[in-house]
Image: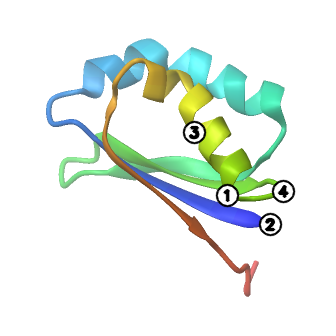
């Protein structure tokens, strides 16, 4: 099942994102469930959130992945939404 994780960073949290980026990318690689991922950008082109497409067994698996993400553990996100997603193009 594909799940879209959409997260918005807390205001002023760019340094938290930068400090945890390597651990976040390593987590993506080690878990092997990320199909696509990338940051949202603000008006000035700075990273301000994340879109991650997960391929997991169920919503509980997506929630477990989200809770284990170094970004989440560092308190980066203001909000996180997990939604089942259907790939149509690409």
Would residue 11 appear left or right of 56 to someone viewing this image?
A: left
Would residue 14 appear left or right of 2 to someone viewing this image?
A: left
Write down the residue under mark 3: 66
Quarter of the figure with the C terminus: bottom right
First in residue order: circle 1 vs circle 3: 1
First in residue order: circle 4 vs circle 2: 2
Query: CA separation, marks 4 and 2?
Result: 6 Å
Residue 89, image x, y percentages? 73, 85
Residue in the image at 39% along x and 52% along y: 40
Residue 75, image x, y percentages? 34, 24
Numbered mark located on residue 71 in the image = none
Residue in the image at 61% along x and 27% along y: 68
Outermost residue on the front side: it is 60
Would residue 17 appear left or right of 31 to someone viewing this image?
A: left
**The quarter of the displayed image where residue 10 is located:** top left
Query: CA separation, marks 3 and 2?
Result: 15 Å
First in residue order: circle 2 vs circle 1: 2
Write down the residue under mark 1: 59
Numbered mark located on residue 57 in the image = 4
Label 1 environment density (alpha carbons within 10 Å; few <14, some 14–19, many ≥20): some
Closer to the camera, 24 or 75? 75
First in residue order: circle 3 vs circle 2: 2
């Amino acid at each position: 099942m594909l799940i879209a994780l959409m997260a918005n960073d807390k205001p002023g949290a760019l340094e938290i994102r930068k400090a945890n980026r390597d651990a976040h990318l390593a987590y993506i690689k080690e878990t092997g469930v990320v199909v696509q991922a990338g940051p949202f950008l603000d008006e000035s082109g700075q990273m301000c959130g994340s879109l991650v497409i997960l391929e997991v067994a169920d919503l509980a698996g997506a929630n477990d992945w989200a809770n284990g993400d170094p970004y989440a553990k560092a308190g980066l996100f203001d909000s996180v939404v997990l939604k089942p997603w259907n790939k149509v193009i690409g």
